[in-house]
Image: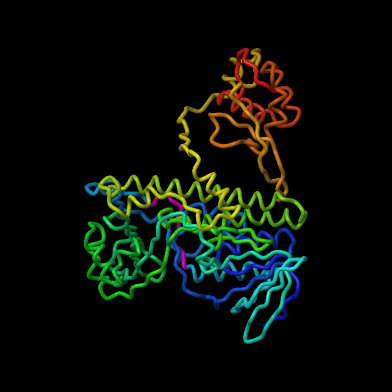
Amino acid sequence: MKTVPDTFDVFILGAGPAGLCAAIRLLDMGYTVGMLEQEQFPRPQIGESLSPGIHNIFEYLNAGHLLEDSAYLSNIPAKVIWENTADIYYRSGQNNEGIIVDRSKLDQELLEFAIAKGLHSIQPAKLKQSINTENGFILEIIADSVEIKVNSKIVLDARGRKGTLLSERVPIAPSAIAVWTHIDNNSITKEALIEAVDDGWLWGSPVAGNRYRIMCFTDPITLKNNSDLHLLDLMNKTELFSPLANKARNGHIETCSVTSFVNQNPWNKQFVKIGEAAFTLDPLSSTGVEKAMRFSLQVAIAINTYLKNPDSQHPKNFYEEKLIESVVNHTHWTADYYRKAWAYSEKKEFWMKRANFQLDISKNQTNFALKLEKEYNQDHPIFEKKQVEPIPVDLFLFSLWNKEINISTDVTFKDVYAINNDRIIIKQALIHPNLERPTVYLDQVELFPFYKSMNGKVVSNVIADLNKFMEIEKSKKILVFLLSNQLLVVDKKYANV
């Protein structure tokens, strides 16, 4: 085993996508990063179906080449039965940049990529204990029957579900279990299949190794201690999967819990949960890896801010805000999607429980859980983007060239967290009914300083003022955005500014 430094800025537990994503970003920021992984790579791992947004993340990490493997599958079309048992929805694979990878291979290559950047990896190894001190944590690690002690200012726990004890979990959905098997793909469709049934839903897709995976998601209570028969029973109830039931009869059946939860105290004395150790998604979204990695990018910003200023409350608050935002958005989206299934309209128990789930923190009333409950119980209307024709910018502005504009009375301002040079800062955001969320930047321009200066001026003068700080095309674009969304109005209504 290579000699391992005894002190790190950041030490990460777990070498899955979430942990490696955080490691790569922190290494790029110049920090010393260590990592412990319990298993020897390569190791088998499910979760190979990656959503389209994964490409942007890998490109951002300068690791996009890792997805360019001829063995990986993309542009897979799908047949879906969901809203109506009589209708099969055909989803084209064209322009859908989702990809099915070999996770054992991809995770190993991502680890090697991080090691080449300077990551110190201890693998395979186990964490014996972590001891909190005034200067961070002392980690006692067992590797090859040898005990290693390392010090770290902060620890990121990316050990997945096993990184969170049952007592630490706040359920954000009813209990669920996945049951799956593989069949030889030589004579099987190259399409993905998705179908809702009374007691759950099934997903099938080609995967690496010339196999076809068939997976059902159901309530644990319905298994009746025989997952083999249950999977076959569900398949036989379907239109899309029943032709495959005989081929699956002799397959090896595997199961795992897929219950969604969030950790009740995810940032605890600089011991920070990320990935599935922080929160797990309902498999319905098919975005687990992408969401975990995207959250890790935000965590890296929080850690950088903390290491620059350990006394600041911004890193923890930012982290919790982003985690709660992810959890709430996902749970409400998921419940809405379950309501769209035909089985929900027929009041099937599996679907009713998921569509009408209520958060209960009675056993986990931590400060974080209380914040989550408050946000979860607020109304979260779905913002519908209006489909409008492109605005001819020059013609639009010319028609208002000598008109006076003012700040709309519907605009308010709010302090929000923003990111600048990989650090968390406070910025003023604009809030308006026509905006999906509080808005700080437009086209990488901070709006607030310019916005208030536009009040009471004519359009031509506003353009001239903006042009002192940015290119003319960008200044026109910003002004048209503000006017067309009615954040600025051409009338005599003045806001209290």
Q: How many marks?
A: 0
Q: Position of residue 263 (x, y in %)?
A: 55, 59
Image coords of residue 264 (percent x, y): 56, 58
Q: The C terminus appears in which quarter of the rendering?
A: top right
Q: Name which residue lies at 53% across and 29% down.
A: 434
Does the magenta portion include 359?
Answer: no
- The residue drawn where x is 69% and y is 57% is 303
Give whichever of 70, 430 is nearer the camera.
Answer: 430
Q: Image check: 229 left or right of 141?
A: left
Colour treatment of the image: rainbow
State which region is magenta.
Answer: 93-102
Q: In this rendering, is residue 400 above or below 319?
A: above
Is residue 101 rendered magenta in the image?
Answer: yes
Give the side of residue 316 with respect to residue 180, left or right.
right
In front here: 161 or 204? 161
Q: Position of residue 458 (x, y in %)?
A: 68, 15
Q: Quadrant of residue 398?
A: top right
Quarter where residue 63 is shown: bottom right
Report the quarter where the N terminus lies.
bottom right
Vertical side of 277 occupied by 314: above or below:
above
Q: Is the magenta region chiefly helix, strand or loop? A: loop
457 to 474, vertically: above or below: above
Which is nearer the eye, 3 or 176?
176
Q: Is residue 220 left or right of residue 411?
A: left
- The residue lying toward the viewer, choosing from 374 and 331, is 374
Q: Residue furthest front?
A: 362
331 w.r.t. 408: above or below: below
Rendered image quadrant of residue 469? top right
Q: Residue at x 47, y 57 (%)?
A: 171
Spot occupied by residue 32 in the image (x, y as percentages of width and height): 73, 66
